[in-house]
Amino acid sequence: MAPTSAAPTHEFHPPPQEMRVWAALGAIYLIWGSTYLAIRLMVETVPPALGAGLRFVLAGAIMMVVLVVRRGAGALAVGRAQLLWCVAVGTLLAAGGNGLVTVAERDVPSGLAALLIASEPLLIVLLRRLAGDRARAATLGGVALGFVGVGILLLPGGRPDDVPLGMTLLVLVASLSWALGSFLQSRVNVPSDPLTATALSLSSGGLVLVVGGVVAGESLDLGAFSAKSVAAFFYLVVVGSIVAFSAYSWLLTHAPISKVSTYAYVNPVIAVLLGAVFLSEDVAVATLAGMALVLASVWVIVRQESAGGEAGADAVAAVETHQLHDETDSATVRTASSRT
């Protein structure tokens, strides 16, 4: 009797698209977790609105030059409606979302600012429900769990007494602006190529911030800028803007938005740790408890999304968009993952 051959073993290899999604998410987790520290360092000597505005204008301009060199002038040829939507999304994301956080971080510690932004996934889920999308109870429960963690972080003992209420509320307004911009970008008529859409959105949002800074009376005094602030500015331009925004724009059309928005729960943990190490920001017991709930919420939401537990329109749209644009957009994710 012939010996029975051993059953063949099969190693599990994640689908290429799933690997790309996680590479882009990893970049967002790490990069945007560190940008809160970089923003705090930049605004020590650089005017916040003008600094943030010039950051996005410069990043957008660099991306446009690269696009024209690689693909020709036609790479920036978009319709009027697409251009207007890029301006709207750029105003909500870059100017309203990131710009307001930059202004607030003159008074708000970087870790606290990141923790307040963690309310963004809850706002996105609420926007989805208002639009008629469905979300499973487990997804809603995961988001609520993260919001409870944020609430604990704002209780006495977790929030510094000297943080102005107005600046704290400004961070929450920024969170709402970012949530609305993220929600719209995945549903409106922006250019299908994420690099083109990102370049136009960043540039328009940056111009809004520059105008706002000038109206507010800000001015540039190059002699007053510290080397630390200048280094933080260029880190925000290259890594925080070009790399991270490209990855984020790609994710919004290739993954469910509730999965994408989990970065808002991971970023605060990284921001709190970096703030404690480099800026000596306090990490109280309440902070540790809140972060534990935040991490638990990330696990719940990602588990639901990975298991296909959510049958909302965003998941279907992500698959369809992947089938149409995978070849064009894979370069974006390779660029993002190479910077992690």
Image (spheres, rainbow, N blue to C red):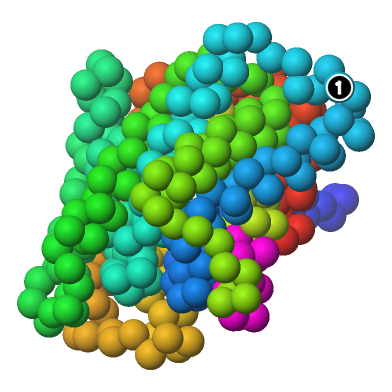
Q: Residue at (41%, 80%) from the top-left corner?
A: 275
Give residue 17's position: percent from left, percent from top. Answer: 67, 37
Q: Does the magenta stretch include residue 9?
A: no
Q: Which span is picked out in magenta?
A: 226-236
229 drawn magenta: yes
Rendered position, 136 above or below 24:
above
144 or 8: which is nearer to us? 144
Q: Is residue 277 left or right of residue 10?
A: left
Frontmost residue, 32 versus 227: 227
What's the amino acid at mark 1? Ala
**Residue 44: percent from the left, percent from the top?**
46, 75
What residue did someone put label 1 on? 73
Which type of secondary structure does the marked residue at label 1 adopt?
Answer: helix
Where, by quadrant of the figure, is residue 305 drawn? top left
Residue at the image point whose x is 8% and y is 77% from the top: 156
The spot of residue 16 in percent (x, y) is 71, 40
Q: Can residue 110 be seen in this view?
A: yes
